[in-house]
Amino acid sequence: MGKYKYLFYDFDGTIANTYEGVAEAMEMVFNAYNLNVDKALYPKYIGPPINETFASYLGSKEKGYEAAYLFRQYYNDNGCIDKTVAYDGIKETFKSLYEKGYKVCIASCKKHEEAIMLLKRFGLYDYIEFVSGLCYNVRETKRAVLEYAVQELKADIKDCVMIGDTRFDVEGAEELGMDCILCLWGFGDYPNIKNKNVVYRAKDPYDAEKYIEE
């Protein structure tokens, strides 16, 4: 086993490509509020809490929650969630890491119940030690979901690493003094992520596993 024991994986853009379904639901909400938002911006909104994205356009936290409710309703009722596809290599690396004794965990700003449902659908859930997802008014930021998982597992930060694709993953880990492996196959603005806690930039899930085992 390498230097880390607890591996905290992000979901959107790290475990699965959620773009198609999220973009469809996002566009519906923007249209409902008569907002003309460039689709080229959509990828950067996949990962952080969706209510914060909507609040930034609508001007208040309350409006953000209202729009997030519309988003979730459409996302779940119109088959958007079913358009999520696990990245190649994720199942194989999770199985491998689990069998080698690593604690594979999820720390995501995807809604907690949705994350669990998709993990089960992709055949990943049996390899997972712990899931910490977004719960409105309880834990809504990357730091919050990550900190909750660390506390519940009674883990030492030096034994932990965050594995994610965006600055939100990197910054959430950084705030806790945790290393981060940056996943280059997701939605991140990679050239502008220069945080010192990024210990490795992985080109695919197998590459991330290789680094973890060093």
Image (tube, rainbow, N blue to C red):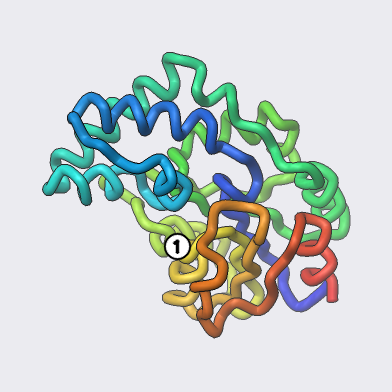
At x 61%, y 40%, the residue is 17
The residue tagged 1 is: 168
Rendered view: 139 above or below 159: above
Q: Nearer the viewer, residue 31 or 210?
A: 31
Q: Residues within 10 Å of mark 1 (few under 14, many from 20)?
A: some
The type of residue carrying mark 1 is Phe
- The image shows residue 119, relative to residue 192, as above or below, that is above
Residue in the image at 36% along x and 28% along y: 72
210 or 143, nearer to the observer: 210
Q: Nearer the viewer, residue 90 or 176?
A: 90
Q: Looking at the image, which is closer to me, 204 or 170? A: 204
Tell me: 81 left or right of 89. left
The image quadrant where one finds the N terminus is bottom right
Residue at the location (44% across, 52% down)?
Answer: 44
Q: What secondary structure is found at the residue carrying circle 1?
A: helix
The residue that appears at 22% across and 24% down in the rendered structure is: 32
Residue 53 in percent (x, y) is at 30, 48
**Residue most extreme to the bottom:** 196
Residue that lies at the very extreme toward the top in this rendered image: 78
Quadrant hosting residue 144: bottom left
